[in-house]
Structures are given as structure tokens and as C-alpha cells.
Amino acid sequence: MKAAVVYSTLTGNMKKVAEAFCTGLGEGAEIFDVANAPDPAEFDLVAIGFWVDRGHPDQKSMDYMKKITGKKVFSFFTLGAKPKSAHAFKCAYTAASYYGSGCEQIGSWHCQGAIDPKLIEQMRKMPKVPGNPHAATPETEARWAAAASHPDAEDLAAATEAAKAVRQIVTGEDPYAELKAKLKAEGKI
Ligand SMILES: Cc1cc2nc3c(=O)[nH]c(=O)nc-3n(C[C@H](O)[C@H](O)[C@H](O)COP(=O)(O)O)c2cc1C
């Protein structure tokens, strides 16, 4: 399987996740910064790793996604919001709409990512008016603090595991091949 992992990052969260994801994809996977993204036509799978910018993939990722047509694609992202939030779910749904025509979406994966401290400072200066989801409140401060330790080792291990499953889906490999070989060698099957 020839796979391209194309990532975009501002503060480094997605680079770490993309490297873990590429490791999980295994043989035939190559990693590229979106600034040096390859022609998608050369690959069986294109996995796009983006950071969430106002509910959408960041601009550079979106621009590249639009150019991909007729490929198996997988999206993964980091975001400041809680990973189980409706916002996270909507980000995944929205991202799916940016690919070019004829793409087969294998799925998507995400985890939380530390928010740029400069952005947090800006949000702390916002007026605390009802309905402003970004204003500093005990809840938003708690959310920003929770995001600060991500992606952590558990997130990176999970990204690697997700990528292994993506590989099996794309190649049609038997996920139990290793176990079966072991049991066979032991005469158990
Ligand atoms: C301009 C800007 C907009 C952002 N918009 C969102 C957003 O809409 N939702 C969200 O959950 N996180 C948002 N974030 C947080 C980032 O998506 C998050 O911190 C991500 O992990 C950054 O990844 P990176 O380190 O690879 O750049 C935003 C961050 C910035 C700087």
C-alpha cells in the first residue's frame, strides 16, 4: 500500500499525531508537511491531518483536500474542544465535505490538542457576554487547561492503533493473520 500522510500544524500538535499515524500505517507510508504535499494521484490512500480552525480544517489542509479526487481518504485532526463534544463531531462531519469528487472516505479520528497560549490570552480579553462561547469562564478555563496536556502518550498510541486499522481496511489484510500463524505454529488450529 502506498500511503501519503499529509499534515498541517501551527504549534506542533498535529506533527506529533501525524508521525504516530504514519508509524501505524507501516510499510509504504510516507509523511509530508502540507507545504510539500505530493500529487495525490500517486497514492492508494491519502490521510489528511489538520488542526481545527473555527470549526473547519485549517486553510492549507482544505486547499489540498479539494484537489484530491477519486482516492481513498482518511481525515484526522486535533482540536481544543473536548473530543467527545458535539463540536468535535461537527468538525469531522464538516471536514468530510471538502474532498474532491469520487473520494472514498475510510473514516476519521481526532484527539484534543493544546491551544496556543497567545490565543488563550486573546480569549481572556473577550467580553464575558452571554452566548460568547470563547469568553473566559470557569468552564472554558477548565477546558483550556484540559487541552494543554494533549496530545499525550495515550493519544499518540491511539493514533497508531487507528492507522493500523485503516491499513487493514485499505489493503484487505486479515487482522488476525498474526494470531492465526501463532496458534497454527502451536498446533492449536
Ligand atoms: C485561529 C485558531 C482557531 C481555532 N479554532 C478552533 C475551533 O474552532 N475549535 C476547536 O476545538 N479548536 C480550535 N482551535 C484550537 C486548535 O485546533 C488546537 O489547539 C490544535 O490542536 C492546534 O494544532 P497544531 O498544534 O497542530 O497547530 C483553534 C486554534 C487557533 C489558533
Image (cartoon, rainbow, N blue to C red):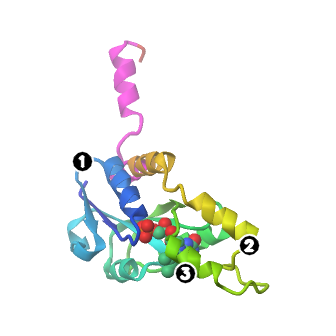
N-term-proximal mark, 1 vs 2: 1
Compared with residue 180, is residue 9 higher up or lower down, i.e. above or below?
below
Specify whether residue 93 is in view: no
Instruction: Name which residue lies at 40% across and 57% down.
Output: 17
N-term-proximal mark, 2 vs 3: 3
**Nearer to the camera, 54 or 120:** 120
Which residue matches tag 1? 27
Q: Magenta stretch containing residue 168, yes or no?
A: yes
Foreground tag (1 vs 2): 2
- Residue 70 as seen in the image, left or right of residue 123: left
Q: Pointer 3: residues within 10 angstroms few (<14), some, or many (20+)?
A: few
N-term-proximal mark, 1 vs 3: 1
Number of numbered tags placed on the structure image: 3
Residue 79: x and y, percent? 53, 67
Foreground tag (2 vs 3): 2
Residue 111: x and y, percent? 53, 59
Which residue matches tag 3? 54
Pointer 2 residue Cβ closer than 8 Å to ligand 1:
no
Q: Hey, which quadrant is residue 7 in on the image?
A: bottom left
Compared with residue 121, is residue 84 higher up or lower down, i.e. above or below?
above
Which residue of the protein is positioned furthest toward the right in this rendering?
130
- Separation of disc 2 and disc 3 at Cα? 19 Å
How would you classify the magenta stretch by its main secondary structure? helix
Amino acid under disc 2 = Thr
Disc 3, SS? loop
- Residue 57 as seen in the image, left or right of residue 68: right
